[in-house]
Amino acid sequence: MTTMPETTPETTVPETVPETTETGAPPALTGPPPLAPPPLGPPALDSRLTVSRWFLLTGAGVLAVFLIALGATLLALVQAQDARQTLVDAVDPAALHTLRVATAVQAQEGAIRGFGLTGEQQYLDAYRKGVSDERAAKDDIGRLVPRLPHGYGVRGQILALTEATDAWRRDYAEPVVARTLDRGPGSLADLARPNLQRFAAVKTALDRQQAALGRLHDTARERLYSAWTTIYAAIAVLGGAMVLALVVCALIVRRAVVGPIARLTRQVREVAAGDFDHELGVTRPAELWELSGHIDGMRRRIMAEWQSSVEARQQLADQAEELRRSNRELEQFAYVASHDLQEPLRKVASFTQMLEQRYADRLDDRARQYIGFAVDGARRMQLLINDLLDFSRVGRVGGEQEEMDSGDALAAALRNLDARLTDTGATVTHDDLPRVLGNRTMLTQLFQNLVGNALKFRSEEPPRVHIGVRRDGDMWEFSCADNGIGVEPKYADRIFLIFQRLHSRDVYPGTGIGLALCRKIVEYHGGRIWLDTGGDAGATFRWTLPALGDPDE
């Protein structure tokens, strides 16, 4: 058994949502939704250098200059160290020991002459001490010889000096000592010539050795000065390389970073100022070139989507204007229907009844039946027009909402149904109904339609109707349960469509607008209505209305 609200059987309407919304809002755009544009990919890279490569190349150049200068510095330090060691540790000591040799030879010559003339022992001791000093100095020079550089003749000069001093002592000093010890002091005239010859050779050897050591000293000093000059130059090159690196880095930052960022900033500022057709782009470096490409791609996408949104808004505006025009026409139609159409229907009904009364004796049963059909059709047409007017006026005329007691709306609905409640012997119970924000007339009509449906589609037992309510978050969930014939679950959505009926008019009269009007009233108040298909018997309709205050109140 199924309960069907007030719907008509003659008109079958497809189960589609009407194009015009119940609150006059424009419908959604027709057609498939636009596809989202694909994500932007990175632009193809070319020969542009990135900032990191700029700095890498600069750093490589500076590092090469630094390494060259560092190598030159290290080489100069080695040369300076070698020159210093040659000069300080070998040449200068050798010159000093050569001077000792010269002093010792001079002391020997004077001492041997004094010993030969006087025979005094002190002169002989002085001579022997001079020989000892000469040999000690030569030994010191001999130890320094391996450390002296080759190619300056120092080693040969030292050997020549040794041979000259040995020849002087052999040909002059030793003979003087031997004759003085044997014969005593005396004239040395016979040995004067060998003395002059040999001692002149000694002086010549000493002069040559000192000259060679002097040349070696000058060469080592020049090498030392040259090494320090090279060190100073390398340090200057290092400093210049550091300064050049700083300058090049500053130029790179200015040319490859600061300048392009400034240009990109100006371009973005122009776009932000309203010049949306201004293209964005910098040529270098590669990172900013790629970034500007992405930004310009986003700009183009935004422009394309903005154009689409402008067109969509224009289309919505056109549709809204069309809806406003259609609504004005509907309001005009409602006015005409409520006045111009009602009057002809009343005349049809009244004159048809007058025809039956005046010519009753001349009419047969078939004619009287036809007249009854005409009167019934006119009355049903009047009822249908009134219901359509009520449906179209929801949210248009007198739709102001206020804080009210939903129990008062139920009470008003039960007063309107008092006669039917008495005739059917129905019992209506309810929970404590809350205060809601709504329209009193509409909520009264909502309760009246739902309770009226329960009375119409009743079973053999006396109707029992219960209006329940419970809090569900920020909504009140109402319910209207009866013990009638019920509704099959497969018709749960169809019954809320206008003019949809499950029973013929001969069985259950009505226009088929009742539940459609209930849904429109509930949705106008911000809720929703549905059929609870989980019950065992009867029909249970549930709907929600926004609650006042917090859920804990």
Image (cartoon, rainbow, N blue to C red):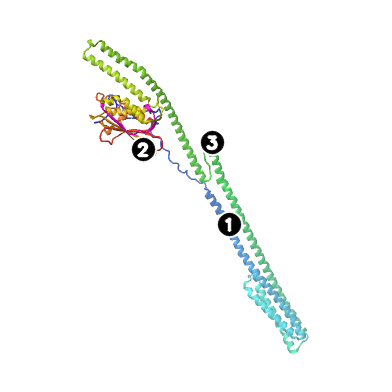
The x, y position of residue 522, in whole percent, is 36, 31
SS for dot 3:
loop
Extreme left residue here? 365
The residue singled out by tag 2 in the image is 472
Q: Secondary structure at mark 1?
A: helix
Which quadrant of the rendered structure holds the C terminus?
top left
| Pointer 3 with pointer 2, Cβ within 8 A | no
**What mark, if any, has residue 273 been given in the picture?**
3
Q: Position of residue 168 (x, y in %)?
A: 71, 80
Q: Quadrant of residue 523?
A: top left
**11 vs 488, nearest the viewer:** 488
Q: Residue furthest bottom?
A: 182
Local crowd at mark 2 within 10 Å, few (<14), some, or many (≥20)? few
Which residue shows up at 34% across the image and 22% down it?
386
Q: Earlier in the sequence, mark 1 or mark 3?
A: 1
The quarter of the image holding the N terminus is top left
Can you tell which mark lies on residue 66? 1
Does residue 138 show up magenta in the picture? no
Q: Is residue 142 visible?
A: yes
- Write the start and end of the magenta stretch as one range: 424-441
As drawn, 31 above or below 337: below
| CA–CA distance in space, label 1 to label 3 | 49 Å
Element at label 2? strand
Three-letter code for the amino acid on which mark 3 is drawn: Ala
